[in-house]
Each structure stands twice: as C-alpha cells, then as structure tokens.
Image (tube, rainbow, N blue to C red):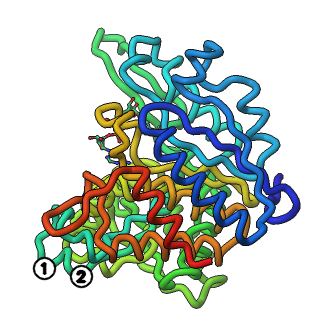
Amino acid sequence: MRNCMSLNKTIAVLAGDGIGPEVMHQAVRVLEKLNQSEKLGLTLAYADVGGAAIDKYGEALPRKTLEICQTSCAILFGSVGGPKWECLPPEKQPERAALLPLRKHFQLYANLRPAKLYPELAHASPLRTDLAAKGFDILVVRELTGGIYFGQPKGIYTCENGEKKAVDTLVYHEHEIERISHVAFRAARARRKKLTLVDKANVLESSQLWRSIVRTLSTQYTDVMVDFLYVDNAAMQVIRRPWDFDVLLCENLFGDILSDELAAITGSIGMLPSASIADGSFGLYEPAGGSAPDIAGKDIANPIAQILSAAMLLRHSLGLEEQAAKIELAVDAVLKLGLRTADIWQEGTQLVTCSQMGSAIVDALEL
Ligand code: NAD
C-alpha cells in the first residue's frame, strides 16, 4: 500500500481528450505556481490516456502510462472519449478501457463528489430562486467498486418456457461497507460533522447491513451526527432542503444517481471536481464532467472543476491542506470579482476564456 504524504511527490498528469488538455493546462499552471512559490517539491509526470493514447499507441491505457501512475502518488486526470472513438467496440472505447482499469488496478473504492452551490452562481441552478439563494455544500461519498454493478450472477437468461429473464445481483461484504464508512465519517469530521446514510433499508437486506455497520462505527465518531434516509426520500429532500445536508454516504447505484442529481442543481458541471481514492493516500482526481467535444479546442471551457480537482489531490493525497485551501479561496475570489466562463455567465458579469480564468486564479493565489 502506498503512502504519499512522504517523499514521493510525483503527480501523474493524464490530460486525455476533448477539453481535457485545455482545462488541465490551467490546473498545471496553478500547481506550478504553488510549487514554485512554496517549494513543495512536486514533480509532474505527463502521460497519454484515452483517445489520444489510442491514436498514438493503439490502446487507451498504454503500459507506459500505467507505469507512470504506479510510480506517482496520485493521478490528476482530465477526461477521455469523443465521437472519433465511438465506433470502436465498447470494451476498447476510452472510458471503458482507461478509467475502469485504473479504478480496478488502484482499488479506488471511494468516490468523493462535492456539490457546492456558490452564492454568486445561484442563478445557474435550476432550483427555485429562494432555495438557491441559501446555497449548499454537500459531499457525496459513493462506494465505487461493489454493489449491483459488479455482483454475480449477472446476465440475461432464457427460462425453460422460452421467456427471457435478466439478473443483477446486489451484494456487499462487511469489509467493503466498513472501509467506505470510515472514509465518510472522516470526511464528515473534517466538515460540518453530519453524516447521512442513504439506503433502502425498508426493502433491501444489503441496506440493513449498511445501517447496522454505520450504527456500530458511529460509536468511534461520537462527534459526528448520523442519520438515515431512504433513497427515494433523499432524492426529494436534497432538492427541498439541500443546505441541511453535509456528507451523504451511498452505496454504488444510489450514489451514482444522487451525485448527478446534486451536480445538476449546482447549475454547472464545469465547476465540480471529484476524487476516487484507495486505502492509504493514493487517488485519482478528475472533473465530474466529460471531454465536452462540443466546446473542445475553443478555449471556452470552464477550468474550475479541473483546478478544484488539483486542490482535492493536494489535500487527500499529499496532506497539503493549506495549499488546497489557497486554491479554493482563489476560485472563490475570482467568482466574487465577477469573472465567468460561458457556462456560468450572466448579464452583468465579465465573460472570460478558459485561459483567462486560469490566469485570474493563478493571480488570486494568496502566496
Ligand atoms: P460532458 O460532460 O462531456 O458534456 C456535457 C455538457 O456539459 C456539454 O454541453 C459540455 O459542453 C458541458 N461541459 C462539460 N464540462 C464542461 C466544462 N468544463 N466547461 C463548460 N462546459 C462543460 O458529457 P457528454 O457530452 O455526455 O460526454 C462527452 C464525452 O465525454 C463522451 O465521449 C463521454 O464518453 C466522455 N465522458 C468522459 C468522462 C471521463 O473522462 N471521466 C466522463 C463523462 C463523459
């Protein structure tokens, strides 16, 4: 198991496709500025991934790229995929052939998806104005490697009478629930100390196991307030009173759906970072959105999700809390100044390009 809060400060930088290289360039500028002024000793190791790697080497995750990731303490990932590679067989397509193997190889079982509505961007949220005005800051902690997506048996079978039946299996082992619950408790402890387990314990056996494990672990985290919410109710409550939630702990399927619902009510996918972490401090950090081929190459993408992903990396994989906070404060500062990329622009604010937004954030870093 790797522990990166020590000597190895190499970050694997995998920009990928579409807007990936454009937004990654801005995140790298931010990291380099901090590295230089604070003598952090970071090394950035660049590698090809996704469609770009298919074009060069014939595969989405070349061995050389994997080796660079293995000798790094974290991966800063852009995004992969695009129309050019959609004709490939599904298992060779960039997302399936690059991201999934990386998750599996590094056992990235905990997906952290912050969903924050900045007061300055309340207009971009589809929530009713009086609800959006209150803002919110929620962290979804989603189990990423178990549950119904992976359980066996799985398949479409033909019954004796010729009728077809489809089977998916929802299975969780105790240790899988325990390790992700610890991640969620620790995250809550570092935030507003509230943890909500989202489940379907009125129907699902697996949810009952989740509840009992979370209840037991809560005795180790007495400073964290714990409650439980059925997933159907949670889907409503996060829209009615999002400010009431701090950390939402979800099994894989529920987390997949709820994190996208929350992303939607923040108004722009271009603002949202994410982390997929393993035991120890290794993690893969990437924007919540994809490669956005519709706006790629135009210097109009929002680089903030990628820049905030770099902040998450500094915090979780390198223990550089102060520097992570500096990046987040710099983002807050440029939003307060009224700078906006096209996806979050509104009348009365200043429209800037991707690179201008990057420059403004670099300038706003309080060094
Ligand atoms: P997408 O997130 O790329 O784009 C959805 C919409 O959001 C588009 O209108 C896009 O312009 C906009 N958007 C996304 N990021 C933005 C940003 N930073 N700034 C401004 N606007 C932004 O999703 P999609 O269109 O469904 O997928 C496009 C490609 O990305 C596909 O090939 C898909 O497979 C891939 N994808 C990759 C990842 C990943 O690498 N993790 C994730 C999702 C999708």
Q: Position of residue 24 (x, y in %)?
A: 53, 46
Write down the quadrant of residue 29 in the picture: bottom right
Q: Mark 2 = which residue?
A: 134
| C-beta proximity under 8 Å, tags 2 and 1 | yes
Amino acid carrying label 1: it is Asp
Q: Position of residue 192 (x, y in %)?
A: 48, 84
In the image, is 202 to the left or to the right of 273?
left
Which quadrant of the figure shows ligand 1? top left
Q: What crowding class fits label 2: few (fewer than 14 Cα within 10 Å), some (14-19), or many (20 or more)?
A: some
Under 8 Å from ligand 1: the CB of mark 1?
no
Residue 205 makes an appearance in the image: no
Amino acid carrying label 2: it is Lys
When the figure is inspected, residue 112 is found, relative to residue 52, above or below; the finding is below
Residue found at x 43% / y 51%: 355
Q: Which mark is residue 130?
A: 1
Residue 131 makes an appearance in the image: yes
Q: Nearer the viewer, residue 204 or 337?
A: 337
Number of residue marks:
2
Q: Which mark is residue 210?
A: none
Q: Residue furthest right?
A: 7
Q: Quadrant of the C terminus?
A: bottom right
SS under mark 1: helix
In the image, is 38 to the left or to the right of 145?
right
Q: Nearer the viewer, residue 314 or 32?
A: 32
Under 8 Å from ligand 1: the CB of mark 2?
no
Residue found at x 49% / y 76%: 329
When the figure is inspected, residue 282 is found, relative to residue 132, above or below; the finding is above
SS under mark 2: loop
Q: Position of residue 84 (x, y in %)?
A: 40, 17
Q: What crowding class fits label 1: few (fewer than 14 Cα within 10 Å), some (14-19), or many (20 or more)?
A: few
Q: Position of residue 239 (x, y in %)?
A: 22, 68
